[in-house]
Structures are given as structure tokens and as C-alpha cells.
Amino acid sequence: MPLVPADPNVVHPMPEQPRVVLLKPLVTSPLIEVGDFSYYDDPDEPTAFETRNVLHHYGPEKLVIGKFCALGEGVRFIMNGANHRMDGASTFPFPIMGGSWAEHFDLITGLPGRGDTVVGNDVWFGYRSTVMPGVRIGHGAIIASGAVVVDDVPDYGVVGGNPARLIRRRHGEEDIERLVRTAWWDWPLEHITRHVRTIMTGSAAELEAAAPDSPTG
């Protein structure tokens, strides 16, 4: 029987579960990039992810999400547009209220930001976790439910809490280096299909042996 890879371009990979959507075919903003098979799960309006879950996104900073990421219900990405001045007596954004206050719009433009928010591949976001502006999350990381991520997360790190702290690493340093180097998420889909069981349950060594450029792959 021929191996048939899944389709990364369908919106609902599980037609019987409309709450699950692939994000890449949904995203329209040039400021958001999502890799193949990264999905969002929400019983309410999963197809509105771009407006309901990416907040204060006025640019120019980007949100970049890698491949094969799993985003639980209520995950939020806060972007740099949420920033307020903090160097004066008040943080209130008077100019956006209009009237003569709008003459001072220069006071709230060009505020310092933290740059793009970048999520690696194979990252799992728990229920209602929040990512603050400019954070970089490494490959294979796990973000616990309710976590508020304010700092970068290392490859295969598990973080939780508010503010989120590193709880542990999923693998030892040497295995993490092997996993990142092997980068199974960049394999051809046919090869991923052939080795799904190894990807899901294998060790770093077994995954390395299954790589397309390995003599045993």
C-alpha cells in the first residue's frame, strides 16, 4: 500500500472536529508566518485566530511560528503594539482618544519594541498560555497551561508559571543537539510519513538513524 502524506493545505484536518484548524492556509497577514501542519484547537472561533489570538499587531514586527506546532485553546500572542510609554508620569495613551489630544500622536509612535516573536518547530502550547512581545521559543519546547512567557525558551525546554520559568529540559544536552541537527520537521513529507512512529516514540539516536541522509534512513 502506498504511503500517503497528510495535506498541509486543508483548513480542517479532522472534518469531524471543526474546532481544529491548520493555521497556514488561514493566515492572510504578511506579518504572520506559520509553517506546515501547525494547528490551533478552539471550540468557539478557531478560524479567527489571526484577530482573536494575535493581539495589538500593528507592525512592523512579525509573528513567526514554525512547523508542527500544537496550540491549545486560548493561546495568545501579545505583540509590540500593546506597548505604552513608561518614562513619564502616566502610561495612559491620551492621543488615541482623539480631539486635541490627537495632536500629540508622536508621543506614542515609535516606542521601543523587542522585535519579532519567533516560535520554533514542534512546540506545544498549553491551554490559555500567553506569549509576550519579542520572545523566541526554541524547537521542541512545551509551554504549560496558563503560562505567561516573558523570556526566551531554550530548545526542548518546559516552562510554566507567571512569569514562566524553566522547569526542565525534555532531553539531555547531547540529545537536544542531535535532535536539532536532525531537524525531522524539514524532512520530505514522504520520509516523515515513513517514519512517523520513530518521530513520535524514538530516541535521538533512532531519529538520527532514520534521517534521509543516514545510511539506514
Image (spheres, helix red, strand yellow):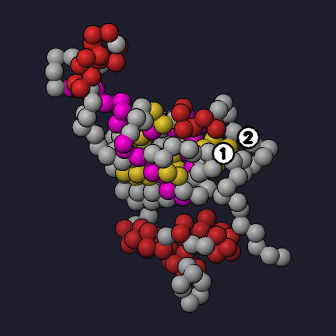
Q: From this viewpoint, is residue 208 visible? A: yes
Label 2 environment density (alpha carbons within 10 Å; few <14, some 14–19, many ≥20): some
Q: Position of residue 30 (x, y in %)?
A: 48, 47
Can you identify the residue that label 2 sits on? 18
The stretch of residues the image draws in magenta is 60-86
Q: Position of residue 163 (x, y in %)?
A: 34, 37
Is the residue 36 above or below the residue 48 in the image? below
Label 1 environment density (alpha carbons within 10 Å; few <14, some 14–19, many ≥20): many
The amino acid marked with disc number 1 is Val
- Is 116 displayed left or right of 217 in the figure? left
The quadrant in which the N terminus is found is bottom right
Which image quarter: residue 201? bottom right
Residue at x 25% of width, y 17% of height:
103
Q: Position of residue 129 (x, y in %)?
A: 48, 38
Residue at x 61% of width, y 73% of height:
188
Is the residue 138 above or below the residue 100 in the image? below
The quadrant in which the C terminus is found is bottom right
Give the Cα separation between the discs numbered 1 and 2.
7 Å
Residue at x 71% of width, y 62% of height:
6
The amino acid marked with disc number 2 is Pro
Can you identify the residue that label 1 sits on? 21
Q: For residue 131: magenta?
A: no
Residue at x 49% of width, y 70% of height:
183
Which image quarter: residue 40? top right
Q: Residue furthest left?
A: 88
Nearer-the-camera pick, 114 or 42:
114
